[in-house]
């Protein structure tokens, strides 16, 4: 049960005065709770990204155009639009002793403006001043107050990210009401640690950020923000430590095998295992034989051979007479793994099946009954695998691919499908060590550092979009040589607000030039449509595949040797590296062309330079983290910390090991969180949506 003292923070935002259904919906969109009602705590964790400094109040003659200013002016006269032109602007002339200013509104009510800005009165207005026809103008000021109102106006006014339809004043008012609801909470941080870092209390930290007294209060590295970031990191580390303790407490069942099936698989390969693959396999086999449950992360570069190591792990438990499940985040990826595994499983005599949302009709019940009877050794699938009607005869090993796209509760759901199930998590993203701590702190880690023999070095070049015609000619030459081409676009269809080449538009243009040898794949297509397009490309009847980033992970067409990435400056480093890894898999020399829109910003320039310089995924991941925060390193968002709302790894990363150590120490002393600090920490887990971990405390 959530502690009742937290109820005011978990109340819906609509409990605040002035927030009706329309605003509630807008706040839901802003606070990333589409389909779920926004809560007071969500608004409090929506931190400012900047501020307006009203301490400087220039005379009109000192105002610099295109800056936010606060000025004291006298209202001279109103110039409403003529009656026959209601859409014309409503202008108000104002002045001080040094210059004049025109305040302009569109679609505003005359009676409202005359009351807000009465002629002959002194008013303080704040907003962006611009030059229009050589004359100073302010369009829709942010604030208009009289002298009494100005006395209460915050001199440092936070600026927040907004969503269309939501006015800054509506957000500020809601934040003020939310701050008034913050209850007195027990302190969950160690007193000595707070003192050493000069951290304020949780409530004071929130007040400092939303009602700053100076610009310093809003710095991410300042005490208020750092306090909240540490709270969030500690909640994350505590949840991982509880999960690990829970998984370990429940005794495992050792799956020991002589290795006959593994030997058959290895014998059927046209190459030998890399040293990393051998080490990872040995670690996993040793883990599986133990009476404790395995929790292991296997990460490595694109094409480093994780699927093969996972299959060797599955072969170990299958030889011991048990079953394995291999879960992928998308249907395309599940079918790709199935196609890769099938010939190797066949060589070893492993009975293999696939289960996704597409297996319907008679086929699905047949698969389910074979699985329950133990007639399937290894099943590959999507999240369909942990649906309620899926039962195993004796599941021993769950293999989860691209785990950060699932989450702790889904990985637990699959593990509950058997008794003491061992867990192997794969990710195709080499992850910097700090992030391994953050997201996989409950796991042992194996890295695959080398690429398998035969992987080609890829010639990577950056080309400005103005040379698009030359690139299309180069694609024609590649097609004439019998090569296959990926062409990746960032969006599915043209957005009115963002000038990006859309996949559908590029597909139409290339089809015009190259006919039906061009295929299209994007995330909004139905599964069978995607499969048909991919199959045509894989067999060679289509030679150009125009795609969005759905091809980023796991798609394997060795004959493809050219990759064009349009608007490469819009992608993160790790994502560009993932995409590039789709080529260089066959005997052909491969080329990757990064098309960018000039001029490039410093970060984009650095990103493309690193990509041209190296194909070492571990180095690229470290650089990506340094350049743009770690959201992109794990591929879930373009930037910002996935799963974290306040902590920024580039600023707060140094707090991570302290949070990890603190969590370990807390649980060593108080494994059930029953002490006064333990009880306070339960509040913390609820606040940061880590309450899944609290349920583990009561579970066997």
Image (cartoon, helix red, strand yellow):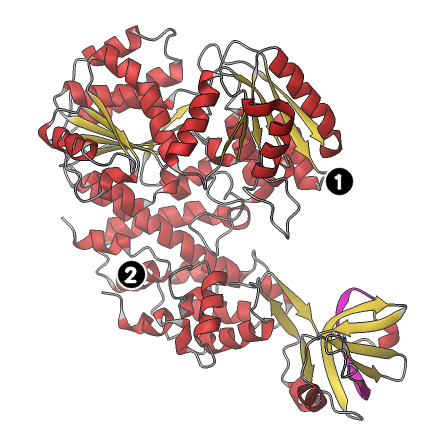
Query: Within the image, what quadrant is residue 1 found in?
Result: bottom left
Residue placed under numbered mark 2 in the picture? 682
User: Residue 76 bears which disc, if any?
Assistant: none
Tell which of 296 and 110 is nearer to you.
110
Residue at 27% from the left image edge and 24% from the top image edge: 284
Q: Is residue 571 visible?
A: no
Residue at 37% from the left image edge and 46% from the top image edge: 660
Side (left or right) of 206 relative to 169: left
User: Residue 599 bears which disc, if any?
Assistant: 1
Residue 547: percent from the left, percent from the top?
Answer: 53, 32
651 lies above or below 682: above
Mark 1 and mark 2: Cα distance apart in space: 50 Å
Residue at 16% from the left image edge and 25% from the top image edge: 376
461 lies above or below 365: above
Q: Is residue 273 visible?
A: yes
Residue 229: percent from the left, percent from the top?
Answer: 47, 56
Side (left or right) of 670 relative to 68: left
Query: Within the image, what quadrant is residue 573 found in?
Result: top right
In the rendered structure, does residue 446 fall within the stretch colored magenta? Answer: no
409 lies above or below 556: below
What is the chief secondary structure element of the magenta stretch? strand
- The magenta region covers 64-78
Residue 100: percent from the left, percent from the top?
Answer: 87, 79
Q: Judging from the image, what secondary structure is the residue with disc 2 in? A: helix
């Amino acid at each position: 049960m959530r502690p009742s003292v937290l109820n005011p923070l978990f109340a819906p935002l609509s409990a605040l005065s002035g927030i009706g259904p329309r605003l509630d919906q807008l706040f839901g969109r802003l606070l990333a709770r589409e389909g779920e009602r926004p809560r007071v705590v969500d608004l409090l964790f929506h931190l400012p990204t900047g501020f307006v400094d009203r301490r400087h109040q220039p005379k009109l003659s000192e105002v610099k155009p295109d800056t936010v200013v606060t000025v004291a002016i006298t209202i001279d006269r109103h110039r409403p639009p003529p009656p026959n032109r209601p859409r014309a602007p409503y202008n108000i002339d104002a002045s001080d002793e040094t210059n004049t200013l025109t305040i302009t509104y569109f679609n505003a009510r005359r009676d409202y403006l005359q009351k807000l800005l009465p002629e002959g009165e002194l008013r303080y207005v704040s907003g962006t001043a611009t030059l229009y026809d050589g004359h100073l103008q302010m369009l829709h000021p942010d604030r208009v107050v009289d002298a009494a109102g100005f006395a209460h106006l915050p001199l440092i006014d936070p600026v927040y990210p907004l969503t269309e339809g939501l006015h800054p004043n509506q957000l500020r008012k809601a934040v003020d009401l939310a701050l008034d609801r913050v209850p007195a909470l027990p302190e969950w941080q160690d007193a000595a640690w707070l003192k050493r870092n000069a951290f304020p209390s949780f409530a004071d930290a929130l007040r400092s950020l939303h009602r700053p007294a100076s610009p310093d209060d809003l710095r991410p590295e300042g005490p208020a923000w750092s306090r909240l970031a540490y709270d969030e990191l500690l909640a994350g580390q505590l949840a991982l430590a509880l999960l690990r303790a829970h998984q370990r407490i429940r005794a495992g069942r050792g799956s020991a095998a002589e290795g006959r099936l593994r030997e058959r698989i290895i014998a059927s390969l046209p190459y030998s295992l890399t040293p990393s693959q051998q080490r990872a396999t040995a670690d996993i086999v040793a883990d599986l034989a133990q009476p404790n449950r395995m929790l292991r992360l296997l990460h490595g570069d694109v094409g480093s051979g994780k699927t093969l190591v996972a299959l060797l792990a599955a072969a170990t438990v299958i030889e011991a007479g048990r079953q394995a499940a291999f879960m992928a985040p998308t249907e395309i990826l599940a079918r790709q793994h199935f196609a890769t595994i099938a010939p190797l499983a066949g060589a070893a005599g492993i009975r293999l099946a696939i289960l996704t949302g597409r297996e319907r009709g008679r086929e699905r019940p047949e698969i389910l009954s074979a699985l329950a009877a133990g007639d399937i050794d290894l099943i590959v699938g999507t999240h369909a695998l942990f649906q309620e009607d899926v039962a195993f005869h004796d599941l021993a090993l769950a293999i989860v691919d691209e785990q950060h796209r699932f989450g702790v509760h889904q990985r637990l759901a699959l593990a509950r499908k058997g008794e003491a199930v061992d867990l192997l998590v794969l990710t195709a993203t080499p992850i910097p060590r700090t992030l391994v701590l953050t997201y996989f702190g409950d796991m042992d880690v194996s890295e695959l550092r080398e690429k398998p023999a035969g992987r080609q070095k890829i010639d990577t070049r950056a080309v400005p979009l103005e040379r698009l015609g030359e690139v299309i000619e180069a694609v024609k030459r590649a097609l004439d040589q019998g090569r296959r081409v990926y062409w990746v676009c960032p969006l599915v269809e043209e957005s009115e607000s963002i000038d990006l080449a859309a996949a559908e538009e590029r597909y139409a243009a290339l089809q015009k030039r190259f006919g039906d040898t061009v295929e299209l794949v994007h995330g909004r297509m139905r599964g069978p449509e995607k499969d048909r397009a991919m199959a045509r490309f894989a067999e060679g009847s289509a030679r150009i595949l125009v795609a969005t980033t759905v091809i980023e992970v796991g798609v394997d067409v060795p004959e493809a040797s050219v990759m064009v990435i349009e608007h490469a400056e819009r992608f993160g480093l790790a994502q560009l590296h993932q995409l590039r890894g789709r080529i260089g898999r066959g005997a052909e020399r491969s080329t990757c062309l990064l098309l960018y829109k000039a001029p490039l910003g410093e970060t984009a320039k650095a990103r493309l330079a690193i990509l041209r310089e190296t194909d070492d995924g571990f180095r690229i991941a470290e650089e990506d983290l340094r350049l743009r925060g770690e959201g992109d390193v794990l591929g879930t968002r373009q930037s910002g910390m996935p799963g974290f709302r306040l902590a920024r790894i580039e600023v707060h990363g140094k707090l991570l090991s302290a949070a990890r150590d603190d969590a370990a120490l807390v649980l060593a002393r108080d494994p059930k969180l029953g002490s006064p600090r333990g009880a306070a920490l339960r509040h913390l887990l609820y606040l940061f949506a880590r309450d899944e971990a609290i349920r583990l405390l009561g579970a066997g």
